Amino acid sequence: MHKLLLSTSVGILALFGAGVASADELLDLQKNPKQWALPTGDYANLRYSKLKQITTENVGKLAPAWSFSTGVLRGHEGAPLVIGDVMYLHTPFPNIVYALDLNNEGKILWKYEPKQDPSVVPVMCCDTVNRGLAYGDGKIFLAQADTTLVALDAKTGKLVWSVKNGDPSKGATSTAAPHVFKDKVLVGIAGGEFGVRGSITAYDVKDGKLAWRGYSEGPDSEVLLDPEKTTFLGKPVGKDSSLKTWEGDQWQIGGGTTWGWYSYDPELNLIYYGSGNPSTWNPAQRPGDNRWSMTLWARDLNTGVAKWVYQMTPHDEWDYDGINEVILADQTIGGVARKTAVHFDRNGFGYTLDRVTGELLVAEKYDPAVNWATKVDQDKNSPTYGRPLVVSKYSTQQNGEDVNTKGVCPAALGSKDMQPASFDPDTGLFYVPTNHVCMDYEPFRVSYTAGQPYVGATLEMFPPPGDSHMGNFIAWDARVGKIVWSNKEQFSVWSGTVTTSGGLAFYGTLEGYLKAVDVKTGKELYKYKTPSGIIGNVMTYEHKGKQYVAVLSGVGGWAGIGLAAGLSKSNEGLGAVGGYKALSDYTALGGVLTVFSLPDYALPIVAPAN
Amino acid sequence: MRLPLVGALALSVFMGVGTTVRAEAPGDPTAVKEVDGKWFDAQSKPTYKVQADGTVDWYTFSGYRRYHAECHVCHGPNAEGSTYAPALKNSVKNFNYEEFYGIVVGGRENKQAGNDSVMPAFADNKNAMCYIDDLYIYLRARSTEAVGRGRPEKKAEKPPAFAEAEAKCMSAK
């Protein structure tokens, strides 16, 4: 495979050819920086590319090379795939898939548009987003809004198989990209605001046969926990570790959904992801730690059985939905080389764990505004080891139902939401798109009805006192848990980033700018205003000797709710002069992919091969 | 007074859910009559009451709270709309209480190229139906800006009649 991939055209033939056997085709594909074969770039979710035609020196000359309208207006998250000479692009509901010919100026090779019952639209919390496609075994995988997972022939777009993963009439939907690891395609489920019981499911890439499903809460046999062997902070979880932390059968509507990005370590054969908030948002209605919501998971790819778990926010009181990605970087900490797992949680703490054992190494605030907890207890002898030390004033549980708890930072959308961060092995730093927003939160009693919102709190969001900006783009040292540099952004940074060997980090902004900054200093070297606000992820690829950078524009999602008409609380009295203005003053709807490259005159002169 | 769920369903059928109903403006929102802490306009439709010192009636506050749990994930904070759902503070200027009721109970679909939207039916959702008048009252107050953005700072005490009706409605099977 390696040899074949030296030539893209031969490589693609091999991909689609019958009987090409590889232990792990994707492992080979992701080693070729010319392609972007996984929604996360690679198994480890580093979102780092070795391409370096575009550098800190020449990025100022970057220019749009071509663009493509998706024909859909709602929020556009995720990024396209590039495999060989073909780009695969997805849209929000109705979840159209386009195969675009890179040899022919993006001509449409095929288009797939599923027929879905539109009644799924209103059960999608926070817009009808879809975060992209996966590739494997000659197929393109799409997780439709209505939870149908489809496998399409990558060459023709014809449906090969499909399987239903959940029940939208009960509020279950799909927003996340599927992930192919080796011979399995993994999908999660969304619907924490509808009391959906979260799960992650693995299907065989060949035929869609269910391999395993692991729930976030319930009996050990359904959560796929081994009471003796699955560990939590180094100790076995014991029998019924989830059931014991819920009152009665509340776990059946307990949330803990799984709509983030997943990562995979092929050496350990473990997959990593986070589970979301427990349902409802009213903590008084669900006593207990609500395990294993708000948890980082390491599961065996073959069996689904958890090797370790770590619950970050026991008994959530703020909707700090723990689904954000787990980045598998290898780092030296305290002189010891470690296989680490790095996770920027909605709760405002950046966690570094040993991904082999689940040992907690670092847990520090990655936004200084975070105030709901003083710290995460890292004293192994303490009875509260591994738990956040909650500040009573900001505890919506302690303050109780029908009480408005004020000034909690971060807000429910978290110091960072699902938009993925990136790693740069050259600097050893992580590049993190963040939100800089606080909230007032008032929980109250709600009643559960299948398929109906099950929220139970009202909240208002605003920038931290004294600040007028609502986002930061930061460089983070996960070995020590410190911010290295931080760039202010007027709005939350809602776009996934990519870092390159050219010494650059790329990200998008809600106003619609694609930006490139120097990874060492954060200095902004390039910006270009695309047709709409960016909530998609930046990706990069090479085609015919040219490096391209691509990003989806199309404002919407959570950001489209909270920011389209301005945040809910007036900032008068907060000392912010000029303050923020409604996002609608800057941008309007529209799904467009914009692809950038250096103009020919700006290309670096390279000695021809051979 | 709240309509029981059965009554609500009957009303939705009567109104022809999902079809376009000729819009009728709600008329003057001025509160003229109070019953157990709840205010009504001259046509006996639920409305808001804001005192000179800014104190809002309990129902307006309750509507604010429930709106920001059940409605705002689509319709945006303060009923000002999102990138994909209309600003209800404007919508309620165009239809009356009965139409509002029918849409909440039965839902509706709007088809626009590339931007289809679907309002779900809330008929069996107690978090909406037990508070439907509260929601209407809050939106009506927003439609005239009698209540500004954000949480009303001062509110009337929760009326005993409200507490009683709420407990009954939320615990009904």
Image (cartoon, grey):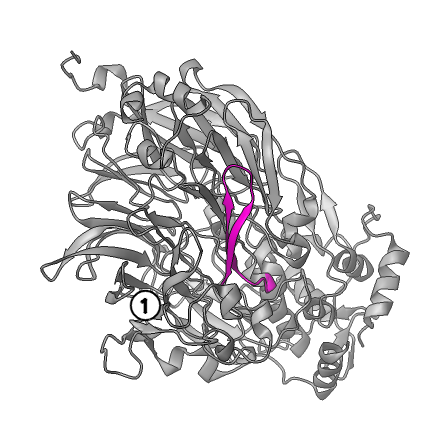
Label 1: few (<14), some or many (≥20) within 10 Å? Answer: many
Q: Could you tell me which quadrant the C terminus of chain A lies in?
A: top left
Task: Return the residue found at the far left.
Answer: A335
- Residue found 37% across the figure and 43% down from its top: A509
> Mark 1 falls on what kind of element?
loop
Q: Could you tell me which quadrant the N terminus of chain A lies in?
A: top left
Give percent across and percent down for residue A465. 34, 67
Task: Return the residue found at the far right.
Answer: B14
| Frontmost residue, A218 versus A131 | A218
Residue ID for mark 1: A370
| Frontmost residue, A577 versus A448 | A448
Give percent across and percent down for residue B70. 63, 63
Instruction: Please give left or right for residue A265 compared with residue A278 in the image.
Output: left
> Is residue A205 within the magenta segment?
yes
Image-quadrant location for residue A39: top left
Tell me if residue A400 comes above or below residue A427 in the rendering. below
> Is residue A558 within the magenta segment?
no
Instruction: Please give left or right for residue B131 compared with residue A72 in the image.
Output: right
| Frontmost residue, A12 versus B141 | A12
Image-quadrant location for residue B104: bottom right
Give percent across and percent down for residue A598. 27, 22
Residue A366 in view of the camera:
no
Residue B134 in view of the camera:
yes
Give percent across and percent down for residue A566. 48, 54
Tell me if residue A135 comes above or below residue A377 in the rendering. above
The chain carrying label 1 is A
Tell me if residue A112 comes above or below residue A444 in the rendering. above
Tell me if residue A514 comes above or below residue B1 in the rendering. above
Q: Which residues are magenta?
A: A194-215
Instruction: Please give left or right for residue A283 compared with residue B6 in the image.
Output: left
Type of amino acid under label 1 = Val
